[in-house]
Amino acid sequence: MDWFARIDAYCERTDFSYWSEPLNAITNLAFIIAAITMWRRSAGLPAARFLCVILFCIGVGSYLFHTHATQWAALADVAPIGLFILNYLFLANRDMVGMPWWAALLITALFAPYAYVIVPLLNQLPFFRISNFYWTVPILLILYAAFLRGAVGKGFIVGAAILCLSITLRSLDEIWCAQFPIGTHIFWHLLNGVMLGWMIEVYRRHMLATRAA
């Protein structure tokens, strides 16, 4: 693989200059702000703070991709997202569902075969094919919400709703490019900053409620 190969994936980019995607780059501040905000709110909860560190890295990685637009920057973009998903899933299994750590780890590992099955199914649907992998997350959140219910279940439903809107707007970026030249990818960043911060907040509230019980 050529790690310096150029990638033109979004409507806003018109060439390969550093600031060809200014809005896509700057809106990554949503992740940074959410990470800093939740870090301050998560004192005494090391797992929540670790999620905040990953969230900060998501903002940095996405910024690098929308400025450098290379294969290595694409990896810097997607790797922290995958890390956040897996870490949050482990914490949900361990601390919200109540599994022992080894079972939580085992169920978390099943995310790979789950995605392996779901993504090809999504590829059969033209619109969902555009952001196929990302749709696996709100589907999983809804499944967990049905099992967990209560405050955590409601929190997961809110997170899933925000993410569905976010993925929809991400998928419309190229489709609406002629009508909306700056693209809709900026809303993916803004909404995901809110959504990921909210998911950390759901975990934080649950852990504090558990301690108080």
Image: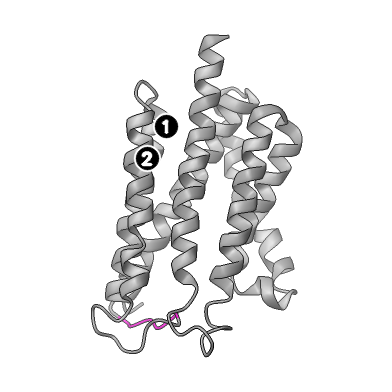
Mark 2 element type:
helix
Mark yes or no: residue 113 visible. Answer: no
Q: Nearer the viewer, residue 91 or 201?
A: 201
Coloring applied to the structure: one colour
Picture coordinates of residue 112, whole percent (x, y): 59, 52
Image quadrant where one finds the C terminus: top right
Residue shown at the point (38%, 52%) measured from the top left? 31
Q: Mark 1 sits on what residue?
A: 48
Graded by Cα atoms within 10 Å as few (under 14), some (14 to 19) or many (20 or more), the crowding at tag 1 reads many
Residue shown at the point (62%, 37%) measured from the top left? 155
Q: In this view, does 26 lie above or below 145?
A: below
Q: Which residue lies furthest to the front in this view?
A: 179
Q: Mark 2 sits on what residue?
A: 52
Mark yes or no: residue 39 visible. Answer: yes
Q: Residue 148 carries which label?
A: none
Q: Give the range drawn in magenta.
A: 5-10
Question: What's the residue type where badge 2 is placed?
Answer: Cys
Graded by Cα atoms within 10 Å as few (under 14), some (14 to 19) or many (20 or more), the crowding at tag 2 reads many
Query: Does the CB distance between marks 1 and 2 fall below 8 Å?
Result: yes
Disc 1 from disc 2: Cα separation? 6 Å
Q: Is residue 135 left or right of residue 182?
A: right
Question: What's the residue type where badge 1 is placed?
Answer: Ala
Picture quadrant where residue 13 is located: bottom left
Picture coordinates of residue 11, whole percent (x, y): 45, 83
Picture quadrant where residue 149 is located: top right
Residue shown at the point (59%, 53%) measured from the top left? 162
Picture coordinates of residue 186, whole percent (x, y): 44, 68
Q: Which of 2 and 171 is in front in this view?
A: 171
Mark 1 element type:
helix
